[in-house]
Image: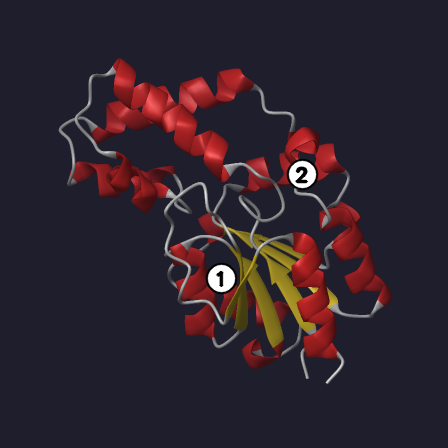
Amino acid sequence: MYKAVIFDMDGVIIDSEIIFLECFKEVLQEQHSCLHKKDLTTMVGLNAKQGIRILADLCDNPGEIMELYDNKLRKLKLNYSSILNTGVRELLAFLKEKGLKVGLASSADAKDIFEVLEETKLGGYFDLVLSGERFRERKPNPEIYIHAARRLQVKTSECIVIEDSAYGIEAGKAAGAYVIAKEELRIPVEQKGADIILPDIHRIKDKILELTSC
C-alpha cells in the first residue's frame, strides 16, 4: 500500500523547464555557441553546478555561460503562480484529504524552492520539503528520495514519486519508489524509465487514486 507521494518541483509543480531551456538557448546564441539542441536536453533536471560539469565536455567557457544564464533568468522575474501546472493545487488538496503524506524533493536550491512555495501558497500542503543542495550528490543519485521516505516515516517502496526529467526518474527508481512521469513532449527528454508516463496532473491524480485504493 502506498502511503506517501513525493513531488519534484520544476516541470511538475511549475511549468518551468521549457522556460529555463529557452533562456539557456538565448544565452548560447548570444555567445555564438555551437552547442546543439540535443546537447541542451541533457541539462533538463540539473542544477547549476551539474550543468557546468556537463558543459565542460561541450564547450570552453562553461562557468561564463552558466553565469550569463543565471543573470538572464533572474532578470525574467518569473511569476510562479502563472506557471503553476493545471491541477496541482487540487491534487495536493486531494492527497491531504486522503491522509497521504506529501513531500517535495527538488534539485533546486532551497531559496528558489521556498520562493516558489511562498508565491504559489502551496507550502502548507507539504509535510516535508527537501533541497538537493543539502546532499553530497543530487539526482540521479537516489539519496534525496531515500532521505525523504525516512523523514516521512515510510519505506521507499511505499512512495509514489512524480517526476519529469530522466535524472529524477532514475533517482526515484533507484530509491525503490513507484515513479510517475509527467509527460513532456516539447523537450526530447527521456522518460521511459518511469513506471508510467501520464499526460497531465489530472491523469496523475486518477492513477494515484487507483494505486492507493488497492
Residue shown at 40% from the left, 33% from the top: 21
Residue 110 in percent (x, y) is at 56, 42
Report the quarter where the N terminus lies: bottom right
User: Looking at the picture, which amino acid does disc 1 mark?
Assistant: Ile
Give the spatial CA distance, label 2 vs label 1: 23 Å
Q: Which residue is mark 2?
A: 84
Residue 3 appears in the picture as rendered: yes
Vertical relation: 210 (above or below) 77: below
Seen in the image, is 182 located left or right of residue 185? right
Q: Which mark is residue 144?
A: 1
Say how many tags the image has: 2
Residue shown at 53% from the left, 74% from the top: 177
For marks 2 and 1, the one nearer the N-term is: 2
Of 201 and 99, the residue lying toward us: 201
Q: Which element type, helix, strand or loop, lies under badge 1?
A: helix
Seen in the image, is 5 located left or right of residue 91? left
Vertical relation: 44 (above or below) 164: above
